[in-house]
Image (cartoon, helix red, strand yellow):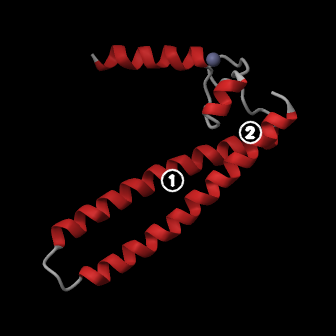
Amino acid sequence: MNTRGTEEIRHRLTIALQEIEEAHEGSMEMLADGFQAFADTVDVASQETDRKILLALRERDRQRARDIRRALRQLEDGNYGICEECGEPIAPARLKAFPTTTLCVHCKEALEQEQYAHAR
Ligand SMILES: [Zn+2]
């Protein structure tokens, strides 16, 4: 991939990471406020549900942040966009659509077929 392409991806990843970190701070405040606001009410069940949803979202964001940091590190190291499985370059169009992917489309498909076979 050319320098302009990787610069664009680095930029997008950096922004995505910032958004996750900001959203994360927001959700932590909500979590804290929520406990205080509902502390004296009987609405414990929905409070618990909200908390579970927030924690699930946080977990998903943590995973995404990890993927983004790894991609940024690979950009730094110059090994970004190489398939983990076969070592071939991943198609630039695929990297644009899924900047944190670590598999080329062939290996991804092979993996999905394998997972599907196991699921049955
Ligand atoms: Zn591959």
Q: Residue, x 37% and y 59% (percent of image)?
A: 55
User: Horizontal and vertical percent for residue 26?
Assistant: 49, 70
Dot 2 falls on a residue whose secondary structure is helix
Which numbered disc covers residue 62?
1
Dot 1 falls on a residue whose secondary structure is helix
Q: Does residue 93 lie above or below 78 as drawn?
A: above
Q: Distance between the residues labelled 2 and 1?
A: 18 Å
Query: Which residue, given by chain and number where applicable, does mark 2 sit on?
Result: 74
Q: Do the residues labelled 2 and 1 touch (CB within 8 Å)?
A: no
The residue sitting at the right extreme is: 3
Q: Does residue 89 lie above or below 53 as drawn?
A: above
Badge 2, how many Cα within 10 Å: few under 14, some, many 20+?
some
Q: Residue, x 23% and y 83% (percent of image)?
A: 39
Q: Is mark 2 within 8 Å of ligand 1?
A: no
Name the residue type under label 2. Gln
Badge 1, how many Cα within 10 Å: few under 14, some, many 20+?
some
User: Horizontal and vertical percent for residue 79?
Assistant: 77, 32
**Residue 87, quarter of picture:** top right
User: Horizontal and vertical percent for residue 94?
Assistant: 64, 26
Q: Quadrant of ligand 1?
A: top right
Of residues 26 and 55, the one drawn nearer to the viewer in this rendering: 26
* Left or right: 43, with 7 as reference point: left
